[in-house]
Amino acid sequence: MRIGIFGGTFNPPHRGHRHIAEDFREQMAAIGLPLDKVLIIPTFVPPHKETPDLASGEDRLAMCEMCFRETPEEGDAVFEVSDYEIARADVSYTYMTLEHLHEEWPGAELYFVMGDDMLLYLPKWARPEKILEDAVLVSTIRSHECTVEALKAFAKETYPDQYAAGRFLFFESEPFPVSSTEVRALVKKADRPIAKETLNKLLDPEVLQYILERELYQ
Ligand code: ATP
């Protein structure tokens, strides 16, 4: 079994998230490693961590369900939103979540997808070597400010053994440059038609409606 994993704060989930998840699924199939499913795992954020404008875990889970809902084409891996980290209600380092997934699906191959910002931050994560033992890291660019070549060079220099062992995969795709930070700033101006128009392009309509009805990020 081959499981894709996509973790993030998803505060809120936007079309850039959906874009990378779809591309991930497609590109894995294209290189002969089709995924059986893609787990979308919103992270628990501890209350003491200063995170301005953080929606509750419950809201982020609900919005992920909306953002990643689909009728998959036959043969496509399904997107499955997991409440594992939020339900634990404690900090879950990625290496811990990967260990849990290996216990749940013994023998499964895990592929963890991320944007360029996350990959470049890897040395600061808890136990990156353990992460690379338990999962293959799959990364792509979020905008044209970074290149896949730069990501490869970084991985090769920082983790040469794991790089040589094929623990990194990269895919080229047309970026969809948006961030949750930008979305939250736009929501504060959602009464202006231009902001609303941009939000319609950046968010799933159900997610936008959910945000406005619940007055999130105001
Ligand atoms: P924030 O602006 O609040 O920091 P974000 O938009 O970076 O949020 P996260 O939930 O932190 O979103 O990101 C989760 C994962 O999605 C990370 O691996 C990140 O690199 C990736 N990601 C986020 N936005 C994009 C995008 N537009 N294109 C590709 N990957 C993205």
Image (cartoon, rainbow, N blue to C red):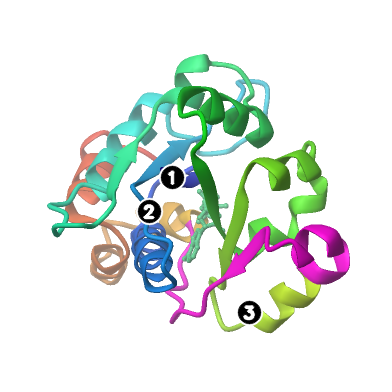
The mark found on residue 29 in the picture is: none
Badge 2 marks a residue whose secondary structure is loop
Residue hosting label 3: 148
Q: Using the rendered view, name the quadrant where residue 148 is placed.
A: bottom right
Badge 1 marks a residue whose secondary structure is strand
130 in relation to 76, above or below: above
Badge 3 marks a residue whose secondary structure is helix
Q: Nearer the viewer, residue 40 or 52?
A: 40
Marks 3 and 2, Cα distance to the nearest angstrom?
A: 22 Å
Q: Quadrant of the C terminus?
A: top left
Instruction: Write the residue at 34% across / 68% down.
Output: 26
Labels 1 and 3: the sequence-earlier one = 1
The reply to whether residue 146 is visible in this rendering is no
Labels 3 and 2: the sequence-earlier one = 2
Q: Using the rendered view, name the quadrant where residue 150 is placed.
A: bottom right
Mark whose residue sits in front, 1 or 3: 1
The mark found on residue 35 in the picture is: 2
Q: Amino acid at mark 2?
A: Leu
Q: Amino acid at mark 1?
A: Ile
**Does residue 161 appear to the left or right of 205 in the view shown?**
right
26 in relation to 208, above or below: below
Instruction: Write the residue at 45% across / 79% down.
Output: 173
36 in relation to 178, above or below: above
